[in-house]
Image (spheres, helix red, strand yellow):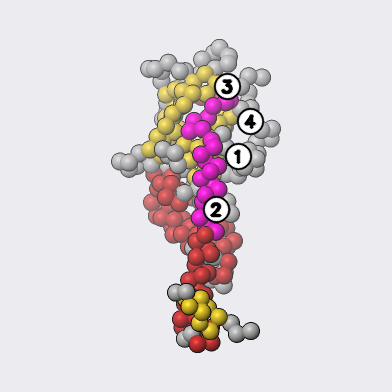
Amino acid sequence: MLNTVKCYNRIIPAAKLAPSKNLMMIKSQKRLSEFTLGALLMGCLSAHAQSLPAVQQHSLRAPAGIKIDGKTTEWSNRFQAYNKATGIYYTMANDSTNLYLAIQAKNPVIVRKILGGSMVFTVNGSVKKGNKQVAFTFPLLSSSVSAGIGIYLKQRIGLTPAKTKNIYGRDSLLLLINTTLINNLKQIRVKGVKAFADTTLSVYNDLGIKVRALFDTNNALTCELAIPLKYLKLPGTMPARFNYQIKLNELYANTAKFGGAYTLVGK
């Protein structure tokens, strides 16, 4: 049977099409298929985000054996809230020793804002106004490092399986991105803690303040933070309740932020 192509309601034998036009139609159909698949994936992500509240509604006990490693394994790859104003997913939890915060950004624009301008997590020691605040700024990266990661990430996003003959395949680029991130994420800025002066701490400090960031195979950036409760100026009565704020893009004028309240889970 002669192969045919439908064009403007006419059936034309494929053999009569110029090779270049035939190839253009095939490429066009391929691009449309890739676009449709991408749109479906984005639609699924959007539907999931819309099903979550803008601010976390319930307190959580931290998973047993939790590790601050930039992975969402302990959280079962799920988050408690999606804040549209900032474009981030997040979960807050605690145990008897630490407060934990896991934040994830999937939108490349939001990822670039976090890498270039950092995030600030602020805790107000109670739900009353006027209390002294404690703030933690992370991830801290130089402009050249954040720009370099952004370039690698853009290359990886545009690298379809058909293009993996590139010098850097998708897996290699992910390894390069995460290695660069880990090797350069060496500090966290701390403000308002009574135990020591406002300072920039090493991420390898012996104070129990931990931070880690990592990209996953879907190009989402996850940042995890652990803070000993003793540094948060919380009320002595249990269960302690406090206000918090998460702010993105601190270094620029178009800062995005939101806040909420959290009650510690008791023993």
Q: Residues within 10 Å of mark 1 (few under 14, many from 20)?
A: few
189 or 5: which is nearer to us? 5
Identify whether 201 is placed above or below 220: above
Amino acid type of the residue tagged 2 in the rendering: Leu
Residue that carries the numbered disc 1 in the rendered image: 78
Asked if the residue under mark 2 is in contact with the one under mark 3, i.e. CB atoms within 8 Å, the reply is no
N-terminal of the pair, mark 1 or mark 4, is 4
Give the mark toward the camera: 1 or 2: 2
Which of the two residues, 46 or 127, is positioned nearer the viewer here? 46
Task: Please report the residue visible at 48 percent of the width from the left and 33 percent of the height from the top.
Answer: 54
Residue 226 visible at all: no
Q: Find disc 4 in the rendering and name its residue.
A: 62
Q: Earlier in the sequence, mark 3 or mark 2?
A: 2
x and y percentages locating residue 96 in the rendered image? 63, 23
Distance from Cα at disc 4 to Cα at disc 2:
30 Å
Which span of residues is magenta-colored?
37-59
Q: Main secondary structure of the magenta part?
A: helix
Residue 254: horizontal and vertical position, in percent? 32, 41
| One can see residue 267 in this view | yes
Label 1 – label 4 distance at C-alpha: 13 Å
Which x, y percent locates residue 100? Answer: 57, 32
Marks 3 and 2 sit apart, C-alpha to C-alpha, by 36 Å
x then y, percent, for residue 41: 55, 53
* Disc with the residue nearer the chain's start (4 vs 2): 2
Q: Nearer the viewer, mark 1 or mark 4?
A: 1
Residue, disc 2: 41
Residue 49 belongs to magenta span: yes
Marks 4,3: beta carbons within 8 A: no
Contact, mark 1 vs mark 2 (Cβ under 8 Å): no
Residue 264 got which mark?
3
